[in-house]
Image (cartoon, rainbow, N blue to C red):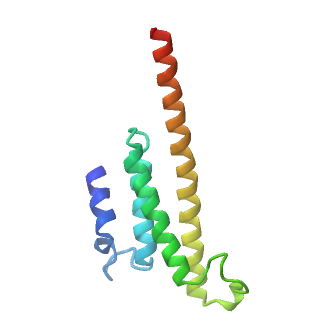
Amino acid sequence: MEQQLAQLAQSPHLLTNPHSKYSWLSPAVLSGTVHLIAAMTYRPSGKFSNCAAHLNAALAIVEAEMEALQVLPKVRGVMEMDMNPIAVREARMLLRIKFFCLENTALVSLTQMQLTQAQAEIAHAME
C-alpha cells in the first residue's frame, strides 16, 4: 500500500482523469489528500522522515493553491462573499487538508519525542 500511495503522490494525474469518480476535486486537493494519507500511513510504522516529507509536500501544495486563489492572510479585504463560489468551495477543502496536515505534523513530533524519551529511559535502565 505504501508503494501505491508513493506512486499516486508522485503522479496525482492518475486520479484526475475526467471519467474518475473524483473528477469534481481539483488536482491540488487530490494531490494534497494523497500526500496526507501517505503521511498517515508512514507514521505508525515509525518512518518519520517519509511522513514529514509527505506532510511538507501537502502543505506546499495547499499553500500554493491558496495563494493562487488569493486566500491567504496576506490578502486583506477579500471576503467570502466577494469570491467565486467554486473558489470558496476549493478554499474550504484546502483549509481542511491544511488543518489535518498541521495536526499530523504535531502528532509526528509528539510521537518522535515519546519514542526518543522511551529509548533514553530504556538505555538508562539497561545501565
- 34 shown above or below 26: above
Furthest residue toward top:
127
Left or right of residue 13, residue 106 in this image: right
**Percent position of residue 60, x then y:** 47, 67
Tell me which corner region of the image, top left, top right, bottom left or bottom right, holds residue 19: bottom left
Left or right of residue 69, residue 119 in this image: left
Q: Is residue 38 visible?
A: yes
Count of numbered labels shown in the rendering:
0
Q: Residue at x 60, y 73 (%)?
A: 92
**Percent position of residue 17, x then y:** 30, 79
Q: Residue at x 28, y 69 (%)?
A: 11
Q: Residue at x 27, y 56 (%)?
A: 4
**Percent position of residue 115, x then y:** 49, 30
- 16 shown above or below 104: below
Q: Is residue 1 visible?
A: no
**Percent position of residue 121, x then y:** 52, 18
- 72 shown above or below 121: below
Tell me which corner region of the image, top left, top right, bottom left or bottom right, holds residue 81: bottom right
Q: Residue at x 46, y 8 (%)?
A: 127
* 112 or 43: nearer the viewer: 112
Tell me which corner region of the image, top left, top right, bottom left or bottom right, holds residue 71: bottom right
